[in-house]
């Protein structure tokens, strides 16, 4: 059995300029992806991908005059960078299959293989991109009462196992303050050891087939 092709990893039809742009996009997305923080030794991290993209720009310009040696260097660097990007994509595919979490394939900079995207069935035809998740925040309890610095985020979903992105902020009016907490298939996320007497805000949105829904209404809780 071969590894399923869930991501588009064929870059042979790209011009060098398009390929360089895609490498930089993949590097940026990798840096922000919540599931891509610890890399195996064969994985090329974002800063190394950017270095490869910079080298390709330099060799592209240096070979523009027709220098055959520079052209050969450019082609070798191009193939080396393709291999690095393909190996990263294979790792993301394996991680998604290992965790049984297709949301890991989203927001990676890679295009999804369209034929592998599951289509809604007639019995489950909710268009998640027209919906928003429901959010509720509850203090975690012990036998003696609420636990200091602990609370639970409860996500009410329009469809079972929907992929939901969660963000948190301490200043919701500042868009740059929103931090991704990950993309979840589960509906309960526990927070412990949070700073006391601090109010935190949450919002969520669905991910489906490479698209995203609007953000949910913001909810907040004062950490005990």
Image: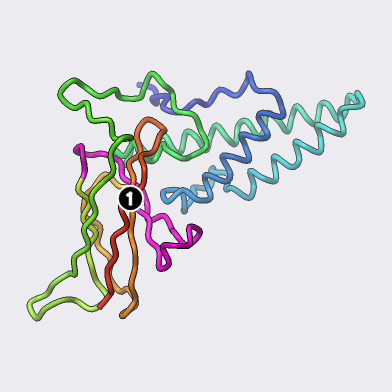
Task: Read off the residue under disc 1.
Answer: 204
On the image, the x and y values in percent for residue 152 come to: 22, 63
Residues rendered magenta in the picture: 157-183
- Which quarter of the picture shows residue 118? top left
Inspect the magenta stretch and tell me whether residue 154 lies in it: no
Q: Is residue 164 left or right of residue 22?
A: left
Q: Is residue 180 magenta?
A: yes
Viewer-closest of 52 and 178: 178
Residue depicted at 29% across the width and 65% down the height: 220
Horizontal and vertical percent for residue 20? 68, 34
Q: Quadrant of residue 82?
A: top right
Coordinates of residue 170 in the picture (x, y in percent): 40, 68
Picture residue at 46% right of the left edge, 38% below the top: 91
Residue 42 screen position, x and y as percent: 54, 43
Q: Is residue 165 left or right of residue 179?
A: left
* Left or right: 118, with 94 as reference point: left
Residue situated in front as seen by the camera: 193 or 70: 193
Q: Alpha-carbon neighbours of circle 1 within 10 Å: few (<14), some, or many (≥20)? A: many
């Amino acid at each position: 059995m071969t590894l399923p092709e869930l991501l588009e990893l064929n870059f042979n039809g790209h011009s060098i300029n398009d390929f360089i742009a895609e490498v930089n996009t993949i590097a940026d997305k990798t840096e922000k992806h919540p599931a891509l923080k610890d890399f195996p030794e064969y994985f090329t991290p974002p800063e190394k991908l950017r270095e490869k993209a910079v080298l390709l720009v330099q060799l592209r310009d240096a070979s523009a005059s027709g220098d055959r040696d520079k052209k050969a260097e450019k082609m070798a660097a191009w193939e080396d960078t393709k291999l690095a990007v393909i190996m990263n994509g294979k790792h993301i595919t394996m991680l998604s299959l290992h965790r049984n979490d297709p949301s890991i394939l989203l927001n990676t900079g890679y295009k999804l293989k369209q034929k592998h995207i599951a289509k809604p069935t007639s019995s489950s035809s909710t268009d998640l991109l027209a919906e928003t998740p429901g959010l509720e925040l509850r203090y975690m309890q012990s036998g003696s009462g609420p636990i200091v610095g602990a609370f639970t985020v409860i996500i009410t979903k329009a469809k079972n196992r929907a992929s939901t992105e969660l963000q948190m902020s301490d200043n919701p009016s500042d868009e740059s303050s929103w931090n991704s907490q990950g993309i979840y298939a589960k509906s309960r996320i526990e927070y412990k050891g949070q700073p006391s007497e601090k109010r935190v805000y949450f919002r969520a949105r669905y991910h489906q087939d490479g698209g995203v829904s609007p953000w949910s209404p913001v909810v907040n809780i004062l950490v005990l």
